[in-house]
Each structure stands twice: as C-alpha cells, then as structure tokens.
Image (cartoon, helix red, strand yellow):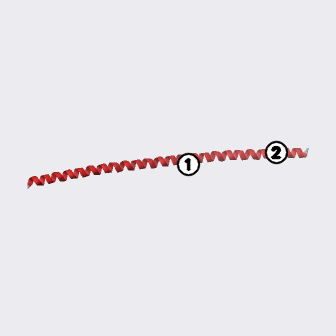
Amino acid sequence: MADWAAMVEARDAEIARLRAALAESERLRGSLYEIFRNTYANEVDRTDRYRLAWLSARRRAAEEAAFGADAVEHYEAKIQQLRSTLGDSR
C-alpha cells in the first residue's frame, strides 16, 4: 500500500510540475506575442514615417524645381525688358 501511495504522490507531483510548466509556457507565449506585436507595430510605424518623409522630400524638391524654373523665367523676362528699354533709349 505504501508503494501505491508513493506512486500516487509522485504522479500528483508530476502533474503539478507539468501544470506549472504549462502555465509558464502560456505566460511566455503571451509575452512573446506582445513583443512580436509591438515590434511589428513599430516597424509599420517606422516604415510609414520613412515613406511620408520620402514623399515630403519629393514634394519639396518638385516645388523647389518649379520655383526655380519660375524664377529663371522671371529673370529672363526682366533681362529682355531691360534690353528692350536700353535699345529704345539708344
């Protein structure tokens, strides 16, 4: 009978150990899931910020190019006007 009681006690101890290991495994899995989710969210956020920065830089470059072209046209017209004025005064 003592052997039977020892065997039941050992079995109960093993079940308790396995339940604790399972609970720890579940806790770790939950933690790993949170880490993965946060990492993914951060990566998506970083990618969005880089994409927005790139689009903003392209827009600024296009605006600067357009402004530069407008400035060149303005100064060429001004130079033409001054040449015309100088030609008329001679």
Q: Residue at x 42, y 49 (%)?
A: 54
Tell which of 82 and 10 is nearer to you.
Answer: 82
| CA neighbours of label 2 inside 10 A, class few (<14), some (14 to 19), many (20+) | few
Q: Position of residue 87 (x, y in %)?
A: 11, 54
| Residue 79 image offset from top left, x and y in percent | 18, 53
* Numbered circles on residues, count: 2
Q: Would you say 85 lies left or right of 51 here?
A: left
Residue lying at the far left of the rendered structure? 90
Upstream in the sequence, badge 2 or badge 1? Answer: 2
At 63% from the left and 45% from the top, the residue drawn is 30
* Residue 46 located left or right of residue 6: left
> Which element carries disc 2, helix, strand or loop?
helix
Circle 1 Cα neighbour tier, 10 Å, few/some/many (<14 / 14–19 / ≥20): few
Q: Which residue is mark 2?
A: 11
Does dot 1 land on a helix, a strand or a loop? helix
The amino acid type, in three-letter code, at marker 2 is: Arg
Label at residue 39: 1
Closer-to-camera residue (73/6): 73
User: Which quarter of the figure is the N terminus placed in?
Assistant: top right
Q: Is residue 54 left or right of residue 82?
A: right
The C terminus lies in quadrant: bottom left
Q: Is residue 87 left or right of residue 32?
A: left
Relative image position of residue 70 (x, y in whole percent): 26, 49
Residue lying at 71% horizontally and 45% vertically, measured from the top left: 22
Q: Position of residue 66 (x, y in %)?
A: 30, 48
Which residue sits at x=23%, y=50%?
Answer: 74
Q: From this viewpoint, which residue is outermost toward the right?
A: 1
Q: Are marks 2 and 1 in contact (CB under 8 Å)?
A: no
Q: CA distance from mark 2 to mark 1?
A: 41 Å
Residue type pointed to by label 1: Thr
